[in-house]
Each structure stands twice: as C-alpha cells, then as structure tokens.
Amino acid sequence: MSGPSSAKDVEISGRDDLLEFLTAGVRPESDWKIGTEHEKFGFRTHDLRPPGFDGERGIEALLKGLVQFGWEPVSENGRVIALSRDGASVSLEPAGQLELSGAPLDNLHQTCHEAATHLREVRSVAEPMGLGFLGMGFQPKWRRDEMPWMPKGRYRIMREYMPKVGGLGLDMMTRTSTVQVNLDVASEADMVKKFRVSLALQSIATALFADSPFTEGRPNGFLSYRSHIWTDTDADRTGLLDFVFEDGFGYERYVDYLLDVPMYFVYRDGEYLDASGQSFRDFMEGRLPVYPGHRPLLRDWADHSTTAFPEVRLKKYLEMRGADSGPWNRICALPAFWVGLLYDATALDAAWDLVKDFSLEELHALRDGVPRHAFKLPFRDGTVLDVARRALAIAAHGLSRRARRNADGADETRYLEALMEFVEAGITPAERKLELFHGPWQGSVDPVFTEFAY
C-alpha cells in the first residue's frame, strides 16, 4: 500500500500503453534484482499500545528521527508520511505499521544487510522514545477500534470503501503485516512460468511463514489469520487468479484483469479524488464520474496496478504476497525461498514439475485450508508439510547453484535455515507461539512484545 506512483505524467493514448507499462519490466537475467518489503507493528513499551501518528512519541516523530541516517522525508499535506534513500523507502501502512520497501539488490547477502541496517536504525530512534517493533502477521492484542489511522488520503478512501465489499478489509488495513519480495522476469514466457509456479506454491509459503495465531489476546483458531483475512476483504481484487493457469495467459490477459478491478482513487495536485468502485475503462474514455472530461496519465495506471491484491501481483515484476511478517531471520528467508525457486533455471523447472499437475480445485483447497491448518493440512497422499519440504529442497539447490557468496565464502542457502528448522520440527512459527501461550506465558500474549520484538 505504497504512496502515489512516480511514473511519468504521460497521457494514456490506448490499451497498448497499459501493456507497454507492464512489459517494460522485462530484463535479461544478468540484470535481475531482489526487492524485499517488510512491515512491522509499533508498540509503546510501557503499555504495549500502538503509537499514533502525532506527538513526541508518535510515528511522524519516529520518521523525522530517521532522517539523521540520510533518509529524505516525503510529505503529504505538510506531514511527513514516508522516507526515501538510495532506491529504498520507509512508508506507513494504515495503522502505522512501518514498512521498509528495499532497494533493488543483486543478492540475498545485500538484502539481509539492508534489513538489519534498517532495524538497527529504527531501534536507535525508537528506544529513546519508548517504542518497540514486532514482526507478526496479525496484531496479537488490540481490537480494530483501538488501532490508530495514519493521515494518508488513499487510506481514507479505502477505509470508507472496504466495508462495502468485505467483512475483514479494515482488519487487513489496520491489523496485518507481511513480508514480500519483488522479482524480475526475462520474457513473457518466463513471466508466465514464474507466475504459475509462485501462485501454485503461495499457500506453501503461507504455511512456512504462518505467524498470526492470536486475536485480541486469545488464540483465534488459525495459524495464519492474516492469510484468512484476505478471503473476506474484496473479491474483486484478491485471490488466486485462476486465469493465470489458462492457455494463452500473458501480459494482455493481466491488463484485462486490472481493467476489471474497480478503482480506488485518482491522485491530482496533491489530493486523492475518491473514485472507489469506478471503472478505469471509463477513465480511459474520459467518462470517470469523479473526474469527468479527463483521461488517465501513465502514473494513474501505475497507481491502479497497486490496488489489486492477488496472492501474486504483477507490476513490472512479480510480487510474492503470501507470507506473514516475522522476526529478522525470516525477513531474509522469504526472498531466499523465492529466489531459490525462481532465479535458477534448473530449480524453476523442478518447481514447475512439482506443481504442474495441481488442479484448480486442489489449489483452492490449499488456499482455503492452509490459514487454519498450515503443515498439517492433508494433500494428496500426505500433507502440506511434505510439499513444503520438497519446495524448500528445490529452493536450497537453486541458491546453491547461484553460488552468490559473501566475504566469508558462505552462499545464500544460509538464509533458508530459519525455515528448515520449522520444517524439520513439523511445526509453524504460530504453533511455537501457541505452545508458549499455553505454557510459560500462562495464557497471556504480552510476552510476545518482549521475546519477539526486533
């Protein structure tokens, strides 16, 4: 949920411009990058409540404090709502979840260094303010009405629209956090293959990273409640995208999908115009009710492409969206899992062999069942754990073949260790927290804010 796009202010002349925007991301393998994003919940250390935007201990003050590290402030209506530095940005989700959108980097060693540097900078500013940060998929303690709202125009529009199209959209906005990775493609055929593999395995990633078992201080019956929330957010812009598996799928079909996704807004002259529920097709004809007589600019299309929320999203690159946020080592593990699967040709072939005969019915059963059961969900002659184990082995071989080594000579497979630990134990991060809740924590979620804070 980033801010307005920086795409050029060029008026769209027709459908080919929309297609060209997406295909502009195609690049040779030698130029492929890794862009990692992660969100986290802030809390006040004295009472564990989420900080608001204003005040000496608010989120805006935190952002201003980070400027000392060379970040450039980004303002909306005179308020600092984001930061930028060297191709990376720090931004705010609707309830103040702090997000690092990392720079496009060459390898996972750089990615992990970037995440560690960011968390160190945040901690150095946050601790004197009496603030801490926690990586989990869902806010474990506070009710929706106890969450603050950040003063961003697009969130005001979404806040009003969400209850019209789903029961849990406001929870998605205010009480979820994720870790994602953006990966490049070499051609349309490469995009199609990676899209299909990553959609088919997205539920496996959800199981591997499942870490949202609590709601308002109690177990909620799910292991990834964050993932479940997306099933009741907005059916027009979420889900598995069955058409990706159809013959003939390519960039043009994805353009058609985006054109069918209802709009949220138009950003003009520093203001968000509420276009919620309106049609981008009408916009292209100059018939948008909220902005009649005007046609879209390329940046409007770029903005619109960020308002679709499928399990895997295509922009100029592919974005993996299935994982709960978590501690530092799993911020590194998420890109490692997908880079290992998708950035090595042999691994990609092996991953496709693993999933190519999964039926749509099976994929939907995984999507619907994994949030509650994760590894234990039955699948064919075994369980999701068996598929996760195979996918993780393919990813490890892919990273090994990439052979990107750090100064100590270690390759990128080291970043999968956090996932291998859980797979070997046969439990998810959520189940480990539930064991603590029912044992040493004596029925309280409060210890999560100390034991698992960054």
Image (cartoon, rainbow, N blue to C red):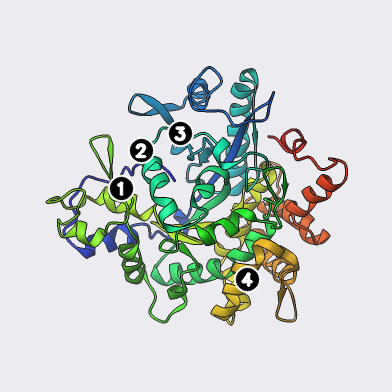
CA–CA distance in space, label 3 to label 4? 34 Å
Q: Nearer the viewer, mark 3 or mark 4?
A: 3
x%, y% of residue 155?
A: 41, 41
CA–CA distance in space, label 2 to label 1? 9 Å
Q: Which residue is mark 4?
A: 366
Residue at the location (59% across, 68% down)?
367
Q: Relative to 313, is 78 on the left or the right?
A: left
CA–CA distance in space, label 2 to label 3? 9 Å
Mark 1 or mark 3, which is nearer the start of the sequence? Answer: 3
Q: Image quarter for residue 342?
A: bottom right
Mark 2 or mark 4, which is nearer the start of the sequence? Answer: 2
Q: Relative to 363, is 373 on the left or the right?
A: right
Q: Which residue is mark 2?
A: 153
Of the residues shown, which amino acid type is indicated by label 2? Gly
- Farthest residue toward the left? 293
Q: Image quarter for residue 403?
A: bottom right
Q: Which mark is residue 150?
A: 3
Q: Nearer the viewer, residue 227 or 40?
A: 227
Q: Which mark is residue 265?
A: 1
Mark 4 or mark 1, which is nearer the start of the sequence? Answer: 1
Q: Nearer the viewer, mark 4 or mark 2?
A: 2
Residue at the location (55% across, 51% down)?
180
Q: Image quarter for residue 346?
A: bottom right
Q: Relative to 41, is 68 on the left or the right?
A: left
